[in-house]
Image (cartoon, rainbow, N blue to C red):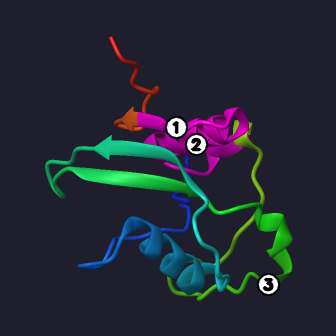
Amino acid sequence: MATGGTVPGGYVDTGESPARACRRELVEELGIERWPRRVLALDWAPSAHDGDKLLWIFDCGDLAEDEHRVRLDGAELDRWEWVPTRELDDYLAARLSRRVKQAHAARAEGRTVYLEHGGEPVRAA
């Protein structure tokens, strides 16, 4: 059962690229400066309430390199912890957990995945 956890992120501001938004959100939420190195996952997330969204997960390098520099803003994130991939369902909403697991696998395999609804990668027919 998910406990309402999340990952750093947020909305792209008008005129801002997804990569710049990622960098900004990392500074705001974790206090570290990183540029995305590559896209790991892109997820089409339709919502009757919010409209369709494209949700990006970027590879910004190993956090372990800057772990000692993490400074939470206390507003959006009040704590952080390392969580084994197999336990993500205990921390994140189901769709986010699936998305993060797919991004983790994509990083390990050196690829990018396109998802729909946080599900399995969409494959060409």
Q: Nearer the viewer, mark 3 or mark 1?
A: 3
Label 1 vs 2, first from the N-terminus = 1
Q: Which residue is mark 3?
A: 69
* Placement of 71 over or under 4, stated as above or below: below
Q: CA distance from mark 1 to mark 2?
A: 9 Å
Q: Residue at x 59, y 88 (%)?
A: 73
Residue 65: image quadrant is bottom right
Q: Foreground: 48 or 105?
A: 105
Residue 58: image quadrant is bottom right
Q: Which residue is mark 2?
A: 103
Q: Residue at x 71, y 86 (%)?
A: 71
- Label of residue 2 in the image: none
SS label for mark 1:
helix
Q: CA distance from mark 3 to mark 1?
A: 28 Å
Quadrant into which the C terminus falls: top left
Label 2 vs 3, first from the N-terminus = 3
Give x and y (percent) for residue 46: 22, 44
Question: Where does the magenta region start and end?
Answer: 87-114
Q: Which residue is mark 1?
A: 98
Label 1–label 2 contact, CB within 8 A: no
Crowdedness near tag 3: few (<14), some (14–19) or many (≥20) residues, C-alpha within 10 Å: few
Asked whether, in this view, residue 114 is left or right of residue 32, the answer is left
Residue type, numbered disc 3:
Arg
Residue 34: image quadrant is bottom right
Residue type, numbered disc 2:
Ala
